[in-house]
Image (cartoon, rainbow, N blue to C red):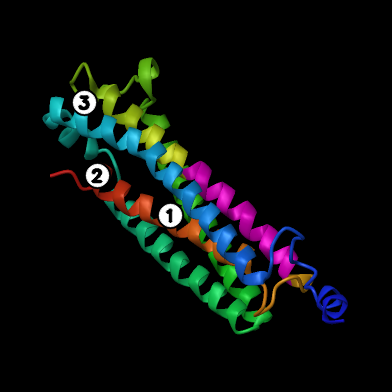
Amino acid sequence: MSEPSAVEERPSHLKHYFVDSDQQFDSAKMGMWVFLVTEILFFGGLFAAYIVYRSWYPELFLMASTELDVFWGTVNTAVLIGSSLTVAMAIRSAQLNQIKGLIINLWITIGLAFVFMVIKYFEYVDKFGKGIFPGEYYAYEGIAHEKANIFFSIYYMMTGLHGIHVIIGIGLMLWLVVKAKKGVFSSKYYTHVEITGLYWHLVDVIWIFLFPLLYLID
């Protein structure tokens, strides 16, 4: 007689192939961690390329890094660290069933992400204006080195790929805001908020590695 009532009380968010909400949450979180590992391996290839070329052309990398604006790179680092805090606060708000706090913190995180992208946009525009393009399109005469395009090709690949991940993160958080306003999330169900937060933390951590490797070469 207890089985029918259990079926009736089954949460709407719980998929039929899971026993309970905890199992569904753990499975989703594990899936996200597996995905994040593949992302780390993906960026790992670029980091490996950076290490190899920097060992071959140390003077070039030192010279080329002076064309990057350390001030704005530092600002962007602070912006992303701040966004990690606000996304953590969003997760905490969901855990406490504070949906208004969840929405506010998501909007702040989205705003900080936009600030990051705007700064990167102006950095790119400044480089393009000087003729600093990747690969064979490199036309900057300020660095007298025949392999100068190597550093900037790596720079554009790393920061460009990271920027794509930031844009994806913005899209995910906008989707979370829409869901939160519809009352989808609560202290009993915030799986998507948690795994999006994990993704965003990875985006921030990758930048924390990119910033010193590209901007603070000494």
Q: Are marks 1 and 2 in contact (CB under 8 Å)?
A: no
For badge 1, the amino acid type reads Leu
| SS assignment for the magenta stretch, majority | helix
Q: Position of residue 123 (x, y in %)?
A: 40, 43
For badge 2, the amino acid type reads Leu
Q: Secondary structure at mark 2?
A: helix
Q: Residue sitting at 68 percent across and 70 percent down?
A: 20
Q: Which residue is mark 1?
A: 202
Q: Is residue 137 above or below residue 120?
A: above
Q: Which mark is residue 143?
A: 3
Q: Which residue is mark 2?
A: 213
Most foreground residue, 191 or 47: 191
Mark 3 to mark 1 CA distance (whole Å): 34 Å
Q: Residue sitting at 27 percent across and 33 percent down?
A: 48
Q: Which quadrant does the N terminus fall into?
A: bottom right
Q: Position of residue 2 (x, y in %)?
A: 83, 81
Q: Nearer the viewer, mark 3 or mark 1?
A: 1
Most foreground residue, 137 or 42: 42
User: Along the polypeptide, which appears first: circle 3 or circle 1?
Assistant: 3
Mark 1 to mark 2 CA distance (whole Å): 17 Å
Q: Which region shows up in magenta?
A: 163-180
Q: Residues within 10 Å of mark 3 (few under 14, many from 20)?
A: some
